[in-house]
Amino acid sequence: MKWPEGSLWTASWGRILASVALVCTALVAGCGGTDTSGGGGGESASTGKKLRVAFNSGLSTLDPAFACDRYEYTVIRTLYDQLVQSKPAKEGESGADVDPMLAESWKTSDGGKVTTFKLRKDVKFASGNPLTAADVEFSIRRAIDKGACANYVVTAGLPDNFESVKALDKHTVRFELKRPDPLFLESIASRASSILDSKLLKQHGGLGPRGDQWLAANGAGSGPYTLGTYRPDSEVELKPNDGYWAGEPKNGGVTVKIVTDASTLETLTKSNQADLVLGLPPKTARDLANSGTELAEDPSQFTTYIGFNNKKEPFTDARVRQALAAVIPLDPLVERFGYGFAEPFAGPIPPAMDYYPDLPIPEPDAERAKQLLAEAGKENISFTVDIENGETTHSEMATVLQDAFREIGVDMKVNTLGSGTFTDRVYNFKSESYIIDDGPTINDPGYFLGYLVRCGDAFNWTQYCNKEVDKRLEEARFNLDSERRATLYKEVSEVVVEDAPYASIWAKDHIVALPGGTTGYQYFADQVPRLWKIAPGGN
């Protein structure tokens, strides 16, 4: 079976997003050996207490094919299992090793182009239906054919390279690629590769729009929890899945509160009304640390940047983009708003990623910026930057950027939007400009740059295109010479800095608050906590 060509799924992306809202920042971890086996049983040590979690922004969907945000991923990983599971980032090489999950073993053949998985025989979905290889084939095909976020993740950014997935018998499934891909197992460990209860979904609309709508707000998995209350802008309740094949969770269930106000989030944390708090602004995190709250801090590949839509005025002219980038005060922004949790960098590849080129960080240069605008013949420029509600640091950054841009005669207006509207505007290329936290689910520059700056990619929200960049990315993706890869990625970074489709602001640590003696938290490269492994403290 052949999968859709990249141009087809890219063309359909806007239409899909128009009907299914998403929120994205993205991304996983996991890679593994060529012949691996092992058990998947878990420990049974539940405290019986519910784990209270707080997010700083809401959700748009629970459908693994359409979800594009780390908070959606967090809930999805509680409802669904995957064939393999990534190890915590500090245990594997760059967080890239995997363990068995629904697959008890696997092996590769044909030079790495074919991988055959043997499934566990003791797994049932929450509905009671037994898990089979047919469910795996159904789930992976659906994830790719829907053409949304999961398409890129499941195929590791190479939809044309993914040949087929086929159930060979009840407990054996085979994947075939056109070319061996070292990122294959990492993509199969992702939440995008979650295995669905195909019988249950078929009862609720199957592969059509009705099935998509149902799956956006319901669970159909074999994971450690089932979905209770689901109010995507305020509260989510997760109930332990009785009889879960890997054992009981370390807690008696999970309640998630959506808290978009930073001061309320801080109060909630200080008063021990939450056991795990995600999405803390750096200032709030520093205040909490100073007051004695335990924080987990990990360098991450996720960054904050301001994007310019290269197909909308005034950003069709590279000189305008270059002028704005030239006056962004990177060091002052980090010093003022980072609170020790962020560092400035130049180019698309952040410090926590392999092949980081460590390009020089430029000083703001208003005179050069004015000269660029004069060369472009642009005067009285005005544009709007979109910001997501709950991202208070982005709002603070925007104020500083407004002042910097005003000095060169550019007026930037700020538009603060709810999660669904922000996602719709950015993902459907409606925004003139936007500030966002973004990063790859797979911590690899080829995977990351493949959607961030590659011509025509559905997730290239700036709509930037440079064919020379694409040529270098294509060569680097499968080049086994690490020195050559480093050279290519540095060259790409230099060109992107010069073209300025967007401007990186900083790389921020991943920060999680663990008030009240919470235990069991581990950092994964996809920045998704495994909630079933976390126990609330004695507060």
Image (cartoon, rainbow, N blue to C red):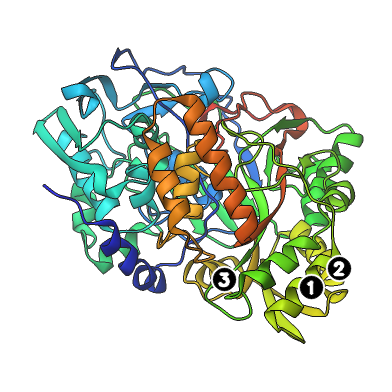
Q: Nearer the viewer, mark 1 or mark 3?
A: 1
Identity of the residue furthest to the left in this view: 169
| The label number, if any, that marks residue 371 in the structure image | 1
Q: Earlier in the sequence, mark 3 or mark 2?
A: 3
Residue 367, label in figure: 2
> What is the secondary structure assignment of the residue under circle 3?
loop
The kind of residue tagged 1 is Gln
Q: In the rendered structure, which amino acid carries the disc numbered 3?
A: Asn
Q: Which residue lies under the disc numbered 3?
A: 309
Check disc 2 and give the amino acid type: Glu
- What residue appears at the point 59 percent right and 25 percent down from the top-left corner? 47
In the rendered image, residue 392, in percent from the top left (x then y), is placed at 77, 60
How busy is the neighbourhood of tag 3: few (under 14 within 10 Å), some, or many (20 plus)? Answer: many
Q: Position of residue 244 (x, y in %)?
A: 36, 29
Q: Quadrant of residue 37?
A: top left
Q: Relative to 508, is 423 above or below?
A: below
Foreground: 152 or 493?
493
Q: Residue at x 57, y 32 (%)?
A: 355
Count of marks placed on residues:
3
Classify mark 1: residues with Cα within 10 Å, few (<14), some (14-19) or many (20+). Answer: some
Closer-to-camera residue (358/426): 358
* Callout 2–callout 1 Cβ contact below 8 Å: yes
Where is residue 535 shown, x and y percent of the image? 61, 27
